[in-house]
Image (spheres, rainbow, N blue to C red):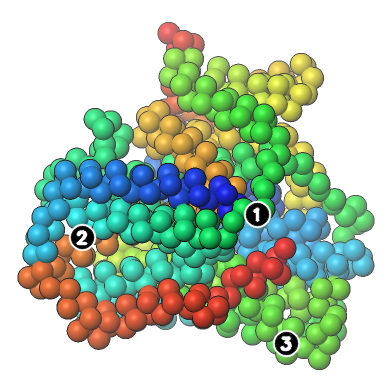
Amino acid sequence: MVKADRWIGILFALFSFYVCVESVRFGLGTYQQPGAGFVSFCAGMILGVLSLALIFLAFSRGTKIRKTWHNPGRVVMVFLAILAFTLLLEWLGFILAAFLLIWFLLKFVEQRGWGFSLGVALVVAGASHVVFDLWLRAQLPAGILGN
Amino acid sequence: MDAIEGILYGFSLALTLKNLAFVFAGVLLGTLVGVLPGIGPAAAISLLLPSTFHADPISSMIMLCGLYYGTMYGGSTTSILANIPGEAASIVTCFDGYQMARQGRAGPALGIAAFGSFFAGTIAVVGLMFLAPTLASVALKFGSPEYFSLMVMSMTLVTYLSQGSILKGLMMAALGLILAAIGLDPVTSTLRFTYDTLVLRDGLGIVPVVMGLFGVSEVLLNVGVTMNREILQSKIKNLFPDRKDWKDSSIPIVRGSLLGFILGIIPGLGTIIPTFLSYGLEKRLSKHPKKFGTGVIEGVAAPESCNNAAATANFVPMLSLGIPANPIMAILLGALTIYGLQPGPLLITEHSDLFWGVIASMYVANVMLLVLNLPLIPLWVQILKVPYAILYPLILLFCLIGSYSLNNNVGDVIIMCVFGVAGFLMKKFQFEPAPLVLALVLGPMLEDNLRQALLISGGSFAMFFTRPLSAAFLVVSVATLLLPLLKMRPTARFRQQEE
């Protein structure tokens, strides 16, 4: 973790610098009347100092412990699936997007059979439409099916 | 309104058919969430929150509190039967609960967990009923310096008590404060960090952030590892503990309940640390400490009682001061704001129906959980057998629906996805999300109070140190930050035990 901490520390330090610059732009005000950027500037400064401390500690302790990442491909696939769901939700509509999400996760991430993944996806999409759309009136988008 | 009058009024609200149904739904869902590994109370409450927008605030809060309660009960079932804690507060229950189950004593372990939780929950609700109004009346005398210092203390306590590096915890708290600044500044109407995005104008919503950090990230972590669930197949019998079990457990239950309640009041302690302390205390006081971990009933009774008492005590600072003790309380605090209620010391007097209704519903929830849980254990065992490969697509879908239906806006879903990945990376690189969530919730209040205090004092920071209560809170904060230097931090020890 220590090696990664160096890079994380650097990223946070850069981020805190950006926050401080933006906060100055919002206006720091005075001590009597703090401006819109006062608190975020202080928080940015604190984050900056802490990031430098993290970098210092990471360098002074040297490299050790290498974190192993299990099945990164599956994690990426799941993330891409929910991202696609988010971007396509309003166009496809909830029922179709939910069906595709569940089917994709079961078929391609979990590598279940066609029949099983299609069946579960159909049941889940239908049931969640009944529960959330019709019963709880969550006003989920109808998308192309609504048109 | 005194406590007796208040609780009677509360029962008149909680015992209506509608609110009974809400309590029932809450505790049932809560137990289910507690049973299922991979989704905790924070994500579950966030998930359910949008569906409560159509109900009145009292019924909604009753259901959400019931859900929180239910998870505490449900978590013990998986700890005992599968050696997997359904939620973090049940980690300790695995030590002796699972060993008891392996010895064919799953029944008494589940039974004592349920009875202990019932006793602790009831005692803690009585404590909450008397303590919260008293604390709220004291808090009415707080000015902005006291509030500011109290919030600083809460954040440092949460950082100090969270697992992992305190430096990283503080970084997360600072990041939370920066994220809390996003949106329209209420004083100058300046837009901060919004980048012409409509969804950011009102600030980052606590619900999508929590769903991402605790729901989506948990799924991303779990799909990367193979979950090995070994559920005991033998028939569960003798749920009622025998005379010896009662003799061994009764004092630990009382001790666990009292310890849990006292520690649960302190912002930041949550429910996990008290359970470890309770287990450690019982082990130290036991005549046979070496037997702990081999299946002694005290090792189940004390921590299970403790986590329920602590869960109830967490409501004390939230309802009386408007200060959340942990991320779950932060979401409930956010829920109160969404329902149009102002959290803080005036909540109890201005919305006595909500306060007493929720308190009375906790009594009802305790009884329901005791009556429901034991007969439903076979059902929970069946649910535990559902493979995670089927469960997580459902968890993800519910998170996506929940975040969308907050404002019917895809922007909230994107925020959830971003924080899902952030939470995944945070856990991978050992950054705790709890300080971030707390700072995000407390940030706007902290900013308001700081600005007000500086305005009143004419720009002098001395006010924070010359007012006794404010100074006391700040002294605790500084001491909390200095303690790690003296290597007096308890969580490192707990983490070793957990591993």
The three-letter code of the residue at mark 3 reads Arg
Q: Quadrant of residue B353?
A: bottom left
The three-letter code of the residue at mark 1 reads Lys
Q: How many angstroms separate mark 3 from mark 2 (CA)?
A: 46 Å
Q: Earlier in the sequence, mark 3 or mark 2?
A: 3
Q: Are callouts 2 and 1 both on one chain?
A: no
**Residue that badge 2 annotates:** B448
Residue drawn at the location 36% of the way across and 55% of the way down: A47
Q: How many angstroms separate mark 3 from mark 1 (CA)?
A: 36 Å
The local crowd at label 3, few if under 14, some if 14 to 19, many if 20 or more residues have their Cα within 10 Å, is few
Circle 3 or circle 1, nearest the eye: 1
Judging depth in this view, the residue of B77 and B279 nearest the camera is B279
Give the secondary structure at mark 1. loop
Residue A1 seen in the current view: yes
**Residue that badge 3 annotates:** B284
Spot occupied by residue B419 in the image (x, y as percentages of width and height) = 47, 41
**Residue that badge 1 annotates:** A64
